[in-house]
Image (tube, rainbow, N blue to C red):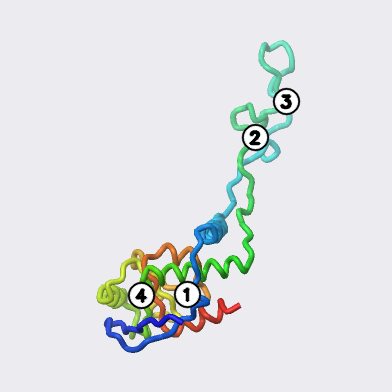
């Protein structure tokens, strides 16, 4: 097991914690990470784009003019796609962009993402991140003290003071351990783990 030092919000070393090799020492593979990130981004697409077909357009079914004698091309009704205001032929339909990925692959990708952060020395473990009240300035001050840029902060349980204080800070995101995902880990430069969250992550990825 690897050992990482644990610091407090003042940047002072307070202890050490062991992290399991089964979760934080997995060789990253770009193909696996790419597959899971694509799955996550595809899942965020609403898939509600749609157009009105010939049968959806309001209008009469009567011929706009007689079949012969006008010198014009014959027309069946004003909802024809060739007519102005008519239906659309090859427009989008509502659809799901969901990509299915096996659970084992998703679990493996999460381990790889965590391992990549450890390899890059971008994991910081805090003994806690308690705030007395909801105050954005307090979080900004702590992040400046720790010299953290674009951090993803992972907490073990609900923490309204921290979650509400950090939500308006650009580039900062707070996630509970159960919501940890590959895309957010890779998107953020630094991964900040509250010490208690490590057990939650280990338990989630133990299988």
**Structural distance between the alpha carbons of marks 3 and 4:** 63 Å
Kind of element beneath mark 4: helix
Instruction: Name which residue lies at 63% across and 54% down.
Output: 96
From the image, tell me which residue sits under label 2.
Answer: 89
Q: Position of residue 54 (x, y in %)?
A: 68, 36
From the image, tell me which residue sits under label 4.
Answer: 165
User: Taking 2 as reference, is 67 above or below it?
Assistant: above
Labels 2, 3: front one: 2
Closer to us: 101 or 95:
101
Kind of element beneath mark 2: loop
Q: Contact, CB < 8 Å: mark 1 with mark 2? A: no
From the image, tell me which residue sits under label 1.
Answer: 24
User: Taking 172 as reference, is 199 above or below it?
Assistant: below
**Structural distance between the alpha carbons of marks 3 and 1:** 67 Å
Closer to us: 11 or 4:
4
User: Taking 184 as reference, is 7 above or below it?
Assistant: below
Left/right placement of residue 34 relative to residue 143 reads: right
């Amino acid at each position: 097991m690897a050992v990482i030092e644990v610091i407090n919000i003042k940047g002072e070393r307070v202890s050490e914690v062991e992290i399991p090799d089964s979760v934080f020492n997995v060789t990253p593979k770009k193909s696996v990470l790419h597959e899971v990130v694509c799955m996550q981004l595809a899942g965020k697409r609403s898939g509600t784009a749609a157009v009105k077909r010939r049968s959806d357009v309001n209008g009469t079914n009567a011929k706009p003019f007689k079949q012969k004698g006008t010198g014009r091309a014959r027309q069946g009704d004003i909802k024809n796609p060739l007519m102005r205001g008519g239906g659309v032929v090859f427009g989008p339909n509502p659809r799901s962009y969901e990509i299915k990925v096996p659970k084992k692959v998703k679990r493996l990708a999460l381990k790889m993402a965590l391992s990549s952060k450890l390899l890059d020395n971008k994991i910081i473990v805090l003994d806690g991140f308690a705030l007395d009240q909801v105050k954005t300035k307090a979080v900004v001050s702590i992040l400046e003290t720790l010299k953290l840029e674009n951090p993803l902060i992972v907490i073990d349980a609900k923490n309204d003071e921290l979650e509400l204080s950090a939500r308006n800070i650009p580039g900062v995101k707070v996630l509970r351990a159960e919501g940890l995902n590959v895309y957010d880990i890779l998107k953020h430069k630094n991964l900040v783990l509250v010490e208690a969250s490590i057990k939650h992550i280990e338990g989630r990825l133990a299988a």
